[in-house]
Image (cartoon, grey):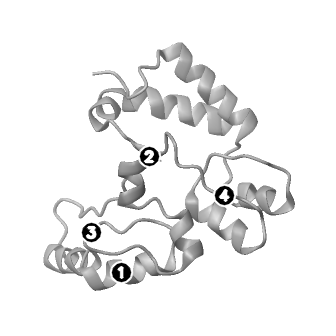
Amino acid sequence: MNNNFNFSQNQLDALIRLAGRKMGTDPQKLKQQMESGQVSIMMGWPGRAYGAAQNDASFEPVWGATLFVFDVFAVPKGTPHLETAMKYINYAIGAGPQAAFADKVPYAAVRSDVKPSSDPMIAKFAPTLDKREQYKFVTQDMEWWGDNIDAMVKAWTAWTAG
């Protein structure tokens, strides 16, 4: 199976080189560049753009071709605290904690029954499920990543090391 964009290895290498020149690797530096006006367009985390906008940077999210990624909870195999870990995960993905999360940070809750933030600025920057459907977010192809993780880690490590 190919990646979502059907990039060849040469194209991926070129994108990594371009990203290094144009984006950098430091999310805090990106936020500072947005706040100071050093960048007029960026690709990055909604939370960083939201933070910059809170500090009067004039950024508006553009959602077309947005890469929708998932964070996950994991419990190490063999942990002596399995029951406690599972209780925490069940609590964290509950409606109450997810609603509190969605109301404080510009990221989507993991539950479809949790409404987006009532704060207009957070709602503008949050990649919520309604935006995912409207703007046709691109979802990571986890099978492709499973097949190509070693090559991508090698390329990423070489890029970030300079």
Gap between marks 2 and 4 measured at Cα: 15 Å
**Residue under numbered circle 1:** 99
Name the residue type under label 2.
Tyr
Check disc 4 and report the residue beneath it.
Answer: 60
| Residue 138 seen anywhere in this rendered image of the structure | yes
Q: In this orientation, which residue lies closer to the viewer: 11 or 118?
A: 118
Q: Is residue 40 above or below residue 142?
A: below
Q: Of the residues under marks 2 and 4, which one precedes in the sequence?
A: 4
In the rendered view of the protein, which quadrant contains the C terminus?
top right
Q: Is residue 150 above or below residue 73?
A: above
Q: What residue is shown at x 44% (from left), y 46% (from top)?
A: 135
Disc 3 versus disc 2: nearer the observer: 2
For the residues marked 3 and 1, what is the alpha-carbon distance in whole angstroms? 9 Å
Marks 1 and 4 close (CB-CB < 8 Å) = no
Q: Residue at x 49, y 39 (%)?
A: 65
Question: What is the CA distance from the residue labelled 3 to the residue labelled 2?
Answer: 19 Å
Q: Is residue 135 left or right of residue 18?
A: left
Is 2 situated left or right of 20 in this image?
left
As displayed, is residue 88 above or below residue 158? below
Q: Quadrant of the N terminus?
A: top left
Q: Nearer the viewer, mark 1 or mark 4?
A: 4
Amino acid under label 3?
Answer: Arg
Residue under label 2: 135
Mark 1 vs mark 2: in front: 2
| SS assignment at label 3 | loop
Q: Which mark is residue 111?
A: 3
| Mark earlier in primary sequence (3, 2) | 3
Disc 4: CA contacts within 10 A as few (<14), some (14-19) or many (>=20)? few
Q: CA distance from mark 3 to mark 4?
A: 25 Å
Look at 49% across and 64% down and name the residue there.
Answer: 126
Q: What is the crowding at mark 3: few (fewer than 14 residues within 10 Å), some, or many (at least 20)?
A: few
Which mark is nearer the camera, 3 or 4?
Answer: 4
